[in-house]
Image: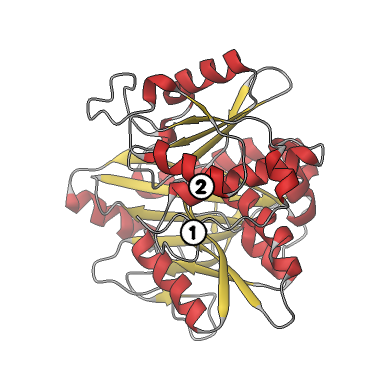
Amino acid sequence: MADMGHCSNSRVAPEINSASPRIVYSAFHGVGAKYVKLVFANFGLPDYIPVEEQLLPDPDFPTLRFPNPEEGKGAMELSISTAEAYGSNIILANDPDADRLAIAEKQENGQWRLFTGNEIGSLLGYHLWEVEGQNAPEGQKFCMVSSAVSSKALGAMAAREGFVFLEALTGFKWLSHVALQARSDGIKPLVTFEEAIGFMLADVVYDKDGISAAAVAAEMVAKCYQSGMTLCQRLSQFYDTYGYFIGYNGYRVCRDPSTMRMIFSRLREYRAGGDIDGVKIYSTRDVGAGTDTAAADGKSDLPTVGGTDFFTLRLSVDLLGTGEPREAPNLILCYRASGTEPKFKFYSELCCSRAEVEGGAHEKLRAIVNSTTGHAVNFTTN
């Protein structure tokens, strides 16, 4: 465990952190409670409200069917009941080994919103750019890094604000390598993240770390609420500034290697310049083959790892039915074979405007993904 004092440097004024609303925290029967308590103290934040039933390590995870905050609201039931009892509007939760972080917020209608990893990544990037990136000494360069299957929202922000956005293969083995290389080139990483609620925010721990992420998230909450905004409102502000990014991810179990090979063989039949049910294919990337039709040299900038099944489609979708061609793709669809489970996974993200969201972009995204994926794998996703 890295020195808590070194990986918990607050960027927010002490009077803002000290006035933070009380936050409910769950360790999910894991090891995080002690260390989150320490970094909250180092940041000058009020102590958290613990979910007592899940505070101490217990390998049987007696209160949880699946000890993973990614499992959704069902895994957060005790956290929500604790927050309701204490009148708290914010929940932070680590997974048992405390390398991931989940965030939930109570909405005006009384319902709880569990933010996705992509949404948390956008919120943290927005926060850290505001409190550090915009106040840095002249000449200091910054970057933000995400996995290739995670949101490109920070890429849109980078294009507007002038910092560097980098991609890596999935997994912090690759993400931390890219971040460390950037640092060696004189570019400071502010946020490195993956959509599976993994975040690397400190200068010492070059791996996903839910402890330092909890502290930075808590100071983000303090600053946000001090300005009169909720996290949900802050996220809407981000989208209104840089574009709306909506996603639809899923997987199917595939235990037969020959079936997996057949699926990716079908995906590779898609060609740039073609279309899928009227949706234009702007470009394709095949990491296993080392190709990317959007690159000037036709080569993928992601490492080619032997046997990698990782295929990307970049599509141009006319959401408003104007009939006018787009200059750049607005939908990215990534497919990969899991390296640890017998799963075929898909990840999609559509960049659009508020008007397009209100016009049914979520439904159109699901329809396009179902159709595109179905061509290759002969099933309709749920």
The colour mode here is secondary structure
- The residue that appears at 39% across and 72% down in the rendered structure is 177
The relative height of residue 266 versus residue 361 in the rendered view (above or below) is below
Badge 2 density bin: few <14, some 14–19, many ≥20, Cα 10 Å: many
The answer to whether residue 264 of the structure is visible from this angle is yes
- The residue that appears at 57% across and 78% down in the rendered structure is 187
The relative height of residue 376 versus residue 172 in the rendered view (above or below) is above
- The residue that appears at 31% across and 22% down in the rendered structure is 65
N-terminal label among 1 and 2: 1
| Residue 116 position in % (x across, y down) | 54, 40
| Residue 163 position in % (x across, y down) | 67, 72
Q: Which residue is mark 2?
A: 39
Q: Quadrant of the C terminus?
A: top left
| Residue 3 position in % (x across, y down) | 41, 58
Q: Are marks 1 and 2 in contact (CB under 8 Å)?
A: yes
Q: Is 14 positioned to the left or the right of 192 in the image? A: right
Given the image, on which type of amino acid does mark 1 rest?
A: Cys
Q: Quadrant of residue 269?
A: bottom left
Foreground of the two, 352 or 236: 236
Foreground of the two, 74 or 191: 191
Q: Is 222 positioned to the left or the right of 270 in the image? A: right
The relative height of residue 194 versus residue 377 in the rendered view (above or below) is below
Q: Quadrant of the N terminus?
A: bottom left
Foreground of the two, 377 or 146: 146
Q: Secondary structure at mark 2?
A: helix
Q: Which residue is mark 1?
A: 7
